[in-house]
């Protein structure tokens, strides 16, 4: 069985590791993966394990858990506000040279230590019972040492200047304030996904036997006809069958300009209708809808850990015991040098400043914010581990049909012979093709778009063409070879018309380039080596490649495309494959990064690491730039975390003696370090 549990109280990679280990010790648990930012645990178990047993294990580890509904977190704001007020009073009094009663300082510190810091003590105690440590262990040790030392001195009659009551208050206050700010920032990171989930309207207008009725969206069934009025949200995914309008798809694309929609166009549930009204047919409901797939994909992606995250978690897990030993060594060293008070202060400062929160937050926050922004831009990330290689690509391989072309045959040229007009050629050709089911026939009929004469004695000649009689003339329409014509040198498909045994002309049918293909490929070409691989005729592929200004190769079977990519990889290139057809699946699986187009085949989308949900090839370069931005943000966070510890641990240990770092400032620096990593990652929300 699979369970997804809400988990509250986690603050760093060590917390994640503790929850995963606690779940892993429950008999019957096969796999447990915990997301820090998503505050969820995904657990795979045997049939004998209950949700209650899993929650009990999490709670025993010192965290809150629930299987249904949200967990009510501990309110941190009142605790840090009271601590800030009391700490400020003590600090201002000290700066002004005013000596407050010793009992007041002791009482204020005791209130913060035993009330405000209660969640920290509970977490540290739970960790201790399970023979592990967390950042709360460091904080509690630091604040308790400062408080206990000060209380001992006070009871012994020490003067005001020798105590650390204000430091013990500020240690707890800054930690709680930092966590409160982090939680608010992480909530911002989750908002984009929540916006998607809440975007679908609750009601729909269903048409039944000409009558319109208002029903709940849950009551809509496949193929139901629905009317969408001006200004309303589209209730479900579907196709427009009647009417025209312009839709605001900024929820999915980030673009503010409305998109024109007419009969045959796809619409997505949750997007906003403009001033027009249209009728649509429901095509995807519930978990099959675009919004549901995006939300599910983002949640899955947040639970999957890229290799670099696993390494960061391992480093953070080892870091805390090392810091405990280091703090003890620093304190004893100063004690041995005849400076016991300096030893206490430096030990406390080392404990506080070295918390590895920033290290543990750097990657999960950046990935989570980036994944949320990708969802907003219509980029579905099925494999978050692919974002790292996507940021370091050398080459991009494109399929032709449906990727850079429209995958829709069109008549692009008509050439009548002497004695015949273009209208005659097209009218007779359309009359014959109207009876054919060949894709090229549909292109001819669509191009003519007018009434055609009746055809008698119609006959289809397999692999050659069609023939019949119309308007008293004997007609044959088909391949150049069948009609004895020469079409060499033309990369397009030519269809010849013969009237009463005489060639009357020909028309060229081609799959034209997508309107955005040339600009998109040119943009990619500035950063990558772009090439075209296709199963179409080589001369056709070469012609398309020339139009795009890139290299191309045709006549390839699916396995041939895979082999081509493999050869590029053996030469040292990191390769991305972009395709939309079923025959692209082997090549997509072979590439370092596989990208499918949302309007392509289901197999291609399931095989691909990334899927572009919108009919815009320009999103491809945007997707790769987003991957680079995520990688850059992760590196900035990790670099800051390591640099912070590298520089400030020696300072906290007394490197600048006689100038010492106050434990209160050490706690503030630790909180600021974690918060800076989160805020830096939040910049990805505005990526364009």
Image (cartoon, rainbow, N blue to C red):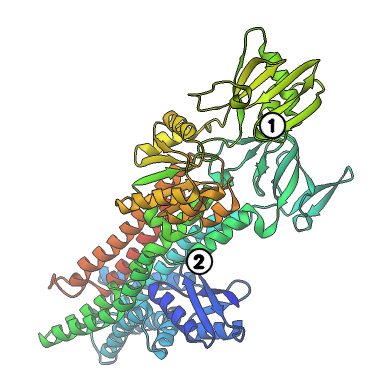
Of 418 and 297, the residue lying toward us: 418
**The quarter of the displayed image where residue 294 is located:** bottom right
Residue 259 is situated, as x and y percent measured from the top left of the image, at: 61, 36
Residue 630 visible to the viewer: no
Cα gap from disc 1 to disc 2, whole angstroms:
50 Å
**The quarter of the displayed image where residue 306 is located:** bottom left
Few, some or many residues within 10 Å of mark 2 (<14, 14–19, 20+): many
Q: Is residue 195 above or below residue 486?
A: below
Of 587 and 56, the residue lying toward us: 587
Of 422 and 469, the residue lying toward us: 469
Residue under numbered circle 2: 38
Q: Is residue 588 left or right of residue 442?
A: left
The dot on residue 442 is: 1
The dot on residue 1 is: none
Q: Residue at x 54, y 44 (%)?
A: 253
Q: Is residue 237 above or below residue 527?
A: below
């Amino acid at each position: 069985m699979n369970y997804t549990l809400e988990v509250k109280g986690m603050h760093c990679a060590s917390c994640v590791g503790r929850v995963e280990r606690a779940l892993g010790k429950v008999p019957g648990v096969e796999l447990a993966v915990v997301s820090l930012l998503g505050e969820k645990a995904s657990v795979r178990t045997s049939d004998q394990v209950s949700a209650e047993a899993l929650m009990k294990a999490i709670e025993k580890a010192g965290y809150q858990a629930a299987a249904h509904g949200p967990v009510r977190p501990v309110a941190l704001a009142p605790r840090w506000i009271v601590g800030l007020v009391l700490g400020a009073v003590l600090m201002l009094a000290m700066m002004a040279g005013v000596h407050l009663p010793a009992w007041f300082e002791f009482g204020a510190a005791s209130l913060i230590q035993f009330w405000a810091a209660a969640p920290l003590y509970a977490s540290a105690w739970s960790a201790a019972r399970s023979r592990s440590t967390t950042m709360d262990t460091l904080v509690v040790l630091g604040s308790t040492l400062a408080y206990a030392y000060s209380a001992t001195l006070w009871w012994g009659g020490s003067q005001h200047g020798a105590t650390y009551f204000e430091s013990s208050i500020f240690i707890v206050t800054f930690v709680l304030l930092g966590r409160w700010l982090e939680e608010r920032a992480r909530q911002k990171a989750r908002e984009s996904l929540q916006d998607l989930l809440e975007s679908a309207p609750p009601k729909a207008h269903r048409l039944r036997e000409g009558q319109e009725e208002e029903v709940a969206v849950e009551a809509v069934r496949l193929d139901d006809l629905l009317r969408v009025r001006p200004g309303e949200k589209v209730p479900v995914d579907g196709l427009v069958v009647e009417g025209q309008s312009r839709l605001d798809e900024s929820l999915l694309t980030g673009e503010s300009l409305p998109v024109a929609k007419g009969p045959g166009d796809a619409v997505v549930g949750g997007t906003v209708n403009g001033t027009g009204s249209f009728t649509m047919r429901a095509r995807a409901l519930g978990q099959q809808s675009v919004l549901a797939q995006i939300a599910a994909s983002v949640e899955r992606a947040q639970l999957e850990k890229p290799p670099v995250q696993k390494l960061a978690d391992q480093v953070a897990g080892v870091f805390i015991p090392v810091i405990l030993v280091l703090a003890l060594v620093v304190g004893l060293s100063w004690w041995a040098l005849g400076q016991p008070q300096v030893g206490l202060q430096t030990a406390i400062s080392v404990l506080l400043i070295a918390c590895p929160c920033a290290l543990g937050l750097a990657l999960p926050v950046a990935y989570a914010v980036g994944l949320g922004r990708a969802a907003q831009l219509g980029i579905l990330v099925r494999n978050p581990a692919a974002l790292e290689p996507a940021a370091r690509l050398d080459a991009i391989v494109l399929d032709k049909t449906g990727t850079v072309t429209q995958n829709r045959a069109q008549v692009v040229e008509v050439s009548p012979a002497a004695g015949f007009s273009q209208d005659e050629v097209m009218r007779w050709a359309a009359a014959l093709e109207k009876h054919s089911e060949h894709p090229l026939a549909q292109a001819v009929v669509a191009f003519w778009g007018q009434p055609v004469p009746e055809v008698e004695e119609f006959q289809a000649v397999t692999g050659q063409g069609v023939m019949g009689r119309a308007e008293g003339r004997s007609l044959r329409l088909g391949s150049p070879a069948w009609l004895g014509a020469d079409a060499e040198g033309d990369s397009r498909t030519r269809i010849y018309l013969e009237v009463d045994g005489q060639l009357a002309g020909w028309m060229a049918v081609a799959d034209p380039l997508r309107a955005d293909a040339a600009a998109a490929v040119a943009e990619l070409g500035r950063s990558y080596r772009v090439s075209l691989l296709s199963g179409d005729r080589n001369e056709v592929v070469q012609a398309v490649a020339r139009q795009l200004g890139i290299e191309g190769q045709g006549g390839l079977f699916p396995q041939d495309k895979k082999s081509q990519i493999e050869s590029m990889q053996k030469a040292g290139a990191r390769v991305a494959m972009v395709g939309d057809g079923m025959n692209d699946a082997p090549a997509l699986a072979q590439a370092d990064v596989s990208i499918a187009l949302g309007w392509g085949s289901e197999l291609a989308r399931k095989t691909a690491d990334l899927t572009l949900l919108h009919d815009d090839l320009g999103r491809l370069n945007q997707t790769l730039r987003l991957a680079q931005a995520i990688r850059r943000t992760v590196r900035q966070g990790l670099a800051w975390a390591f640099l912070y510890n590298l520089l400030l641990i020696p300072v906290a240990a007394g490197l600048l003696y006689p100038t010492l770092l106050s434990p209160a400032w050490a706690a503030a620096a630790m909180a600021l370090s974690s918060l800076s990593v989160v805020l830096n990652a939040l910049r990805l929300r505005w990526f364009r």
